[in-house]
Image: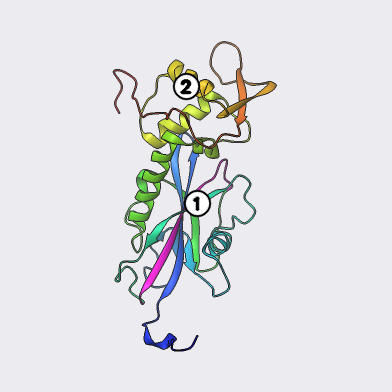
Amino acid sequence: MRGYDKHAFEPFAVTVDLAVLTLRAGALHVLLVERGQEPYAGRWALPGGFLLPEESAETAARRELAEETGLADVTGLHLEQLRTYSEPARDPRMRVVSVAFAALLPNPPEPRGGGDAAEARWVPYDKAQGLAFDHDRILADARDRVGAKLEYTCLATAFCPAEFTLGELQGVYETVWGTALDRPNFRRKVLATPGFVEPVPGAARLTGGRGKPAALYRAGPATSLHPPLPRTPREGRPA
């Protein structure tokens, strides 16, 4: 383009970072990698890396997830852009702007470190602290985003397997929100929301409790909840 000098501006790099969340043993977990290179060698961080010239941010996010954790062809992965982090001093190497993603994954496999990641593992969310760069902030923002979207979208089903019970769905809300919900009220609201879930004909699952097996459901065609599902704790239980 005539009159434009691409050298007139200070160059900077663009990276992607992924806050990948899942439920394991009834607790919220996040996927972390141990950095194998400086800066912050030996520190835990979110998976991610530099955007290549020919890539979109989402393509780079999926590539880095596969390279650093071995999770390449992951069934049920929900990936959405979270926000951009652009504080000038966020990376000690140079000016680096990061496009961060929040990702949800049901029934995840065990990861393995690769690329410049010495190790990869699922870590309980409450123990994921002191991360490299500004990844504590990114992770907290991801949980806040997911928690808020559970109120007005059908995102909770992205934490569930293809077929799930309403108890398992309720467990998603309670785990992410940190709030106990009234079971009959939750069931009533879910089943009264058109397209939120659909019954799997003739399917049921033993839950380990007394009584008949629990019916199985799958995600319906709806994407939003009308009315929203508020974070209302059970009376007498902590929020």
Name the image colouring.
rainbow
Q: Earlier in the sequence, mark 2 or mark 1?
A: 1
| Residue 61 % position (x, y) | 53, 61
Mark 1 is on which residue type?
Glu
Mark identifier at residue 126: none
Question: Magenta stretch: residue 97 in it?
Answer: yes
The residue lying at 55 percent from left, 66 percent from top is 56
Element under label 1? strand
The answer to whether residue 190 of the structure is visible from this angle is: yes
Q: Residue furthest right?
A: 202
Question: Magenta stretch: residue 209 in it?
Answer: no
The residue lying at 45 percent from left, 44 percent from top is 29
| Residue 212 % position (x, y) | 60, 12
Mark 2 is on which residue type?
Lys
Tag 2 residue: 189
Q: How many marks?
A: 2
Tag 1 residue: 80
Per the model, the C-alpha gap separating discs 2 and 1 is: 26 Å
Tell me where the magenta segment starts and ends, as one range. Answer: 94-109
Element under label 2? helix
Crowd band around label 2 with a 10 angstrom C-alpha radius: few (<14), some (14–19), many (20+): some
